[in-house]
Image (tube, grey):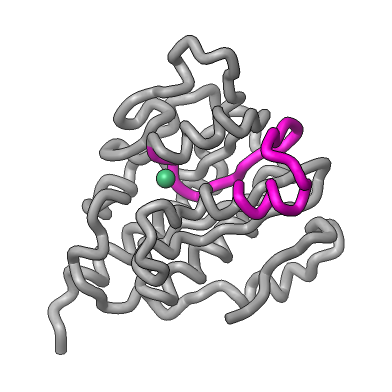
Amino acid sequence: MLNLHTRKGIEGSNPSLSAILFWENGAPLAQLDRASDYESEGQRFKSSRARHSLRPMEDADERFMREALILADQAAALAEVPVGAVAVHEGTIVGCGSNRRETDRDPFAHAEMRALAEAARELGRWRLSGVSLFVTLEPCAMCVGAMILARIDRVVYGTPSPKAGALGGLTDLNALPHNHRLEVSAGVLETECAERLTRFFQGLRAPEV
Ligand SMILES: [Zn+2]
């Protein structure tokens, strides 16, 4: 598997490399039960609309989201629900995660959890103040809970998840009176993020030839 960890930041990364690494062959056929609770209806991603204050697209946000998309493609290559995440500190990626729940047989192996864990190891602290997390799909309750507990500053996601999202999709944990509040941005590269999920779930439903 390609090593996409760009610990030196993406300033010097080669855009053509990212293009090469994108996985363009469509989602593999896999068992329907692999979809489970990440999101089981690809159609839902098609015409989704961000619910949070939609900031003007910032170049940096899009660049980091593109790194998360590469990790989502890594998940898809393993027949995992294609979700990817990067944790960023002071403009540098300090944690990468792709969904590996099936591969690792680990209910906690969501992209965000893996990116946060790696960021904590990299920074040498559990309190991840100053960290922003970029993830292709609105995070679930477990992952939003972890972000709040880790005290990250900001979460940026691509496409909403009406069935499992915990930043307004299914519920909004960030609206509860925790003593830490996340800054949330939604809809960054939403079309690209949603397209991967739609393609994945369409692949699950495709008849075997
Ligand atoms: Zn999650």
Look at the image and say whether residue 121 sits in the magenta stretch: yes
| Residue span colored magenta | 116-140
State which quarter of the image contains the C terminus: bottom left
Q: Is residue 111 above or below residue 149?
A: below
Which residue in the rendered view is the most extreme toward the bottom? 209
Q: Is residue 209 left or right of residue 151?
A: left
The location of residue 79, given as percent across then percent down, is 35, 73
The location of residue 194, given as percent across then percent down, is 40, 52
Look at the image and say whether residue 175 sits in the magenta stretch: no
Q: Is residue 167 above or below residue 92?
A: above
Measuring 48% from the left and 21% from the top, which residue is drawn there? 174
Q: Is residue 107 visible?
A: yes
Q: Nearer the viewer, residue 163 or 190?
A: 163
Q: Is residue 78 above or below residue 159?
A: below
Q: Quadrant of residue 14?
A: bottom right
Q: Is residue 36 left or right of residue 146?
A: left
Measuring 67% from the left and 75% from the top, which residue is drawn there? 3
Measuring 49% from the left and 68% from the top, which residue is drawn there? 73
The location of residue 7, given as percent across then percent down, is 79, 60
Which residue in the rendered view is the most extreme toward the top? 177
State which quarter of the image contains the N terminus: bottom right
Q: Nearer the viewer, residue 79 or 188?
A: 79
